[in-house]
Image (cartoon, rainbow, N blue to C red):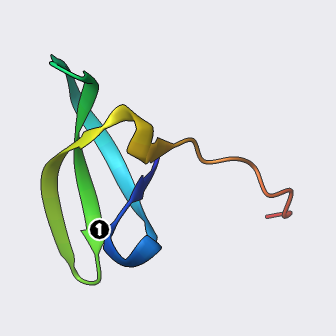
Amino acid sequence: MWVDCSGGYRCPGLVMAWRRAADGWEAQVAVVRGKTVVVQWAPAAALHLVTDDGLDR
């Protein structure tokens, strides 16, 4: 998944769990920021699927 991060950037992340909050669904994600991994809760609207860019291996 891509996760919306501060500054308008998208960071790579891994969804580890889901929960229902008062204003919708949230995912617990591990997000890579530089050389650090941060575990946080993010609203579902901040998550974006990774799509195939069509590059060959």
Q: Give the x, y percent position of residue 20.
A: 19, 16
Q: Residue at x 34, y 65 (%)?
A: 5
Q: Please tell me whether residue 34 is drawn above or below residue 37 in the rendered image.
A: below
Residue reaching furthest to the bottom: 34
Residue reaching furthest to the front: 23
Q: Which residue is drawn at 75% across and 49% down?
A: 52
Q: Give the x, y percent position of residue 22.
A: 15, 19
Tag 1: residue type? Val
Q: Which residue is drawn at 15% across and 63% down?
A: 38
Label 1: which secondary element:
strand
Q: Residue at x 70, y 47 (%)?
A: 51
Q: In this view, does 57 lie to the left or right of 48?
A: right
Q: Please tell me whether residue 10 is drawn above or below residue 3 in the rendered image.
A: below
The residue carrying mark 1 is 32
Q: Please tell me whether residue 16 is drawn above or below residue 18 in the rendered image.
A: below
Q: Quadrant of the C terminus?
A: bottom right
Judge the density around disc 1: few (<14), some (14-19), many (≥20) Cα neighbours within 10 Å.
some
Q: Give the x, y percent position of residue 45.
A: 43, 37
Quarter-of-image position of residue 55: bottom right
Q: How many marks?
A: 1
Quarter-of-image position of residue 35: bottom left
Quarter-of-image position of residue 33: bottom left
Which one is in front, 27 or 7?
7
Q: Give the x, y percent position of residue 27.
A: 25, 33
